[in-house]
Amino acid sequence: MPATKVIVNLPGEASYDVRIGVGVLGGLGAHLRALPALSQVERVLVVTDGNVAPLYLAAAKDSLAQAGFRASDIVVPAGEESKSLAVAGEMWEAMAALSLGRDCVVVALGGGVVGDLAGFVASTYMRGVAVVQVPTTLLAMVDSSVGGKTGVNLEAGKNLVGTFKQPAYVCADTATLATLPEREWTCGCAEIAKSAVIDSDDFFFWLSDAAGALAARDEAVAAEAIARSVVFKADVVAADKTESRGVRECLNYGHTLGHAVEALAGYGTFSHGACVAEGMRFAARLGATLVDAPWEFVQAQDELLDELGLPALAWSAEPADVLAAMKRDKKARGGIVRFVLPRDVGNWELVDVEDAIILEHLAAWRKAKG
Ligand code: NAD
Ligand code: GLY
């Protein structure tokens, strides 16, 4: 199966390639060497986590060495806790101790945690050095490695400190997905479903047909789902690079209730993807009331999520508690809760929804859980 190339063209930025396919990690070094902006670079820092390091760090460093780069590495503990200012601080110090200069490149090898952390560190070390994203989770391949959001968490909330830093290259080797745990696979599937609903009939109906194969981790179907998601995300980011034009918010579809469920159930109780899928089901129903979304769409989305292995959660909470959690989310502005509501596939609206309406729908959501 040949690799696929998607070119991300953003206003005011150098364009960059996303390569998707089996074995593209082997060509990482050669590809970087061929980039005019990086052709003179000598030093590379590979950042990865404790789960990914034993699997793919040697392959990444070998490829870089073959292209004449001198590669060092930093391995952070796996998990969301590494997205912290403390770990970022340790990385800045380690980079200085390695005498890395402004002309080094940071390679983020891992999931969204490593990508966000390494991107943040790269964008701030010596006021910014180049970063390359090498995503190894399905979620990172379809979402976080493209578009340039970086960040770390604070005690006060997730992703509260960060930058926009576009990568110089994204290398998505789908062979690395073979070792991904099932729970992480379905997290990626939820983001793919989100992208398909927001994007178009073409993506949605293709995915509806392919959902069983994607859930069964068919390689060709996964590669196509990744490519379609990257094209979608690149278009969204091109229209609204810094989430200031009311377009990039569409990527938050399903996340309003999703984040509240994640927080109230306790982080880790359900996967992020399971919570996003629950949020998509809820938002679709809210959309049927508020923006006349047809019931056929709500049902088609339910079926898609079921097929992807993202069933409705057998869990609920008091509507008032869920609303309060939604208001604590950083995306709530001035206490007003905003939803991405699909009018139908490929047609959505950002809607500030009154508390009373949210509570009414949350009551129906809770009742449906029995
Ligand atoms: P993650 O990075 O924690 O990876 C999930 C788990 O899979 C980890 O334990 C990791 O060690 C392991 N892993 C990674 N690749 C593996 C592989 N190939 N084989 C075996 N194990 C592997 O989680 P994630 O879901 O990739 O990313 C979540 C993060 O992404 C969150 O912090 C979220 O805020 C962020 N995010 C960022 C953006 C963005 O635009 N920047 C978008 C969405 C999510
Ligand atoms: N929330 C994902 C993004 O905007 O890139």
Image (cartoon, rainbow, N blue to C red):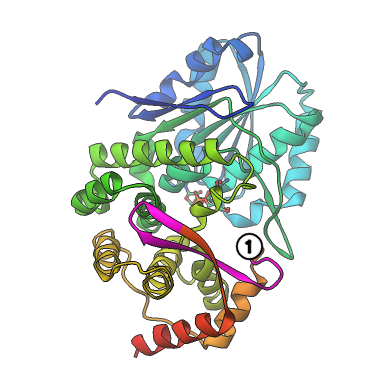
Name which residue type carries label 1.
Lys
- On the image, the x and y values in percent for residue 76 come to 63, 45
Q: Quadrant of the N terminus?
A: top left
Regarding residue 87, the answer to whether it shows in the image is yes
222 to the left or right of 332: left
User: Within the magenta stretch, is there residue 247?
Assistant: no
Of the pair 276 and 23, the residue shown nearer to us = 276
The answer to whether residue 201 is left or right of residue 349 is left
Total residue callouts: 1
Given residues 4 and 48, the one toward you in this image is: 4
Q: Quadrant of residue 368?
A: bottom left
Residue depicted at 57% across the width and 78% down the height = 354
Tell me the residue at 47%/86% (across/down).
360
The x and y percentages for residue 56 are 46, 34
Residue occupying the point 49% across, 68% down:
258
What residue is disc 1 on?
A: 331
**Residue at horizontal 52%, vertical 44%?**
144
> What secondary structure is found at the residue carrying circle 1?
loop
Quadrant for residue 42, please give it.
Answer: top right
Inspect the magenta stretch and tell me whether residue 332 lies in it.
yes
259 vs 200: above or below: below
Q: Quadrant of the C terminus?
A: bottom left
Residue 100, x across and y down, in percent: 76, 23
| In the image, residue 158 above or below residue 239 | below
Residue 144, relative to residue 272: is it above or below? above
The CB of the residue at mark 1 lies under 8 Å from ligand 2: no
Which span is picked out in magenta?
331-348
Answer yes or no: is residue 184 visible: no
Answer few, some or many: residues within 10 Å of disc 1's Cα (few below 14, many 20 plus, some between 14 and 19).
some
Residue at the outermost front position: 292
